Image (tube, rainbow, N blue to C red):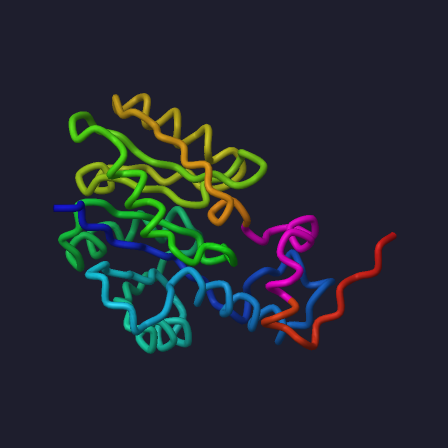
Amino acid sequence: MPDRIALVIPVRSFEHGKSRLADRFTPDQRSRLARAMAEVVVGPRDVDDGVGTIIVCNDDSVAHWARSRAATVVITDATGLNPSLTATRDSVLRSTDADWVVVAHADLPLATDIVGVIGAAIAAQPRDGDRVLIATDRRRDGTNVLALPRATFARWEFMYGPGSLEAHRAQAKRLGLQVIEIDDASLAIDIDTHDDLHAVRDFIARVLPDWKPAEPR
């Protein structure tokens, strides 16, 4: 039987997301873009594949949206990605009996099948031995998707931020875990900086038809 996977997606307020791109989008556009990307990561709500989707948030509007997508909601009072995941770790584990917990960013506009990609990578590995799977960003700096066995998730120290790939790799080594890096273009592109916009111009144009790309300098 294939391992069961729970997909955990931390989502901050849509209205306050992507503040670093405030000079390229209006506040309403930033909100709509953040929601559109999160909907890609969550996937269609009519798909019943036995996979649990858990949204970690501290915003009522995000919680309402998540429930409309048939996702489980875990509320936290913590601020920031690492504190939020740490504070909700026990709640996440109580909400699922999955063998693996996969943490994915909400701003991966091309990630239409995270569970499928991760599931295939897990199935390709030997059953013996503990390991973690990481899909990094295209700069090989961050951790876009992190797949942890259930027991490892229960004790993992989240180190998101600049250099998180190496920080998570080092932690896995300290814990005696093998690291499997996943090279998949759909998981490598997030939207954090102005340079990232060029990689997903078609997506942005589709979800924001009123958006005008900046003219080349």
Q: Position of residue 216 (x, y in %)?
A: 84, 55
Q: Position of residue 8 (x, y in %)?
A: 32, 55
- The number of callouts visible is 0
Q: Position of residue 165 (x, y in %)?
A: 46, 33
User: Does the magenta run of residues contain 201?
Assistant: yes
Per the rendered image, the range of residues in magenta is 190-204
**Residue for point 43% across, 58% down:** 112
**Residue for point 50% across, 63% down:** 37
Horizontally, residue 195 falls left or right of residue 51, namely right
Horizontally, residue 137 falls left or right of residue 80, namely right
User: Does the magenta run of residues contain 114?
Assistant: no
**Residue for point 32% across, 37% down:** 157
**Residue for point 28% across, 63% down:** 74
Q: Relative to residue 217, is residue 150 depicted above or below? A: above
Q: What is the magenta segment's predominant secondary structure? A: helix
Q: Relative to residue 210, is residue 159 depicted above or below? A: above
Between 195 and 14, the residue placed more toward the observer is 195
Between 68 and 23, the residue placed more toward the observer is 68
Q: Relative to residue 210, is residue 55 depicted above or below? A: above
Kindly indicate the quadrant of the structure image that contains residue 51: bottom left
**Residue located farthest toward the right when viewing the structure as drawn:** 217
Q: Relative to residue 27, is residue 149 depicted above or below? A: above
Between 206 and 190, the residue placed more toward the observer is 206
Between 208 and 1, the residue placed more toward the observer is 1
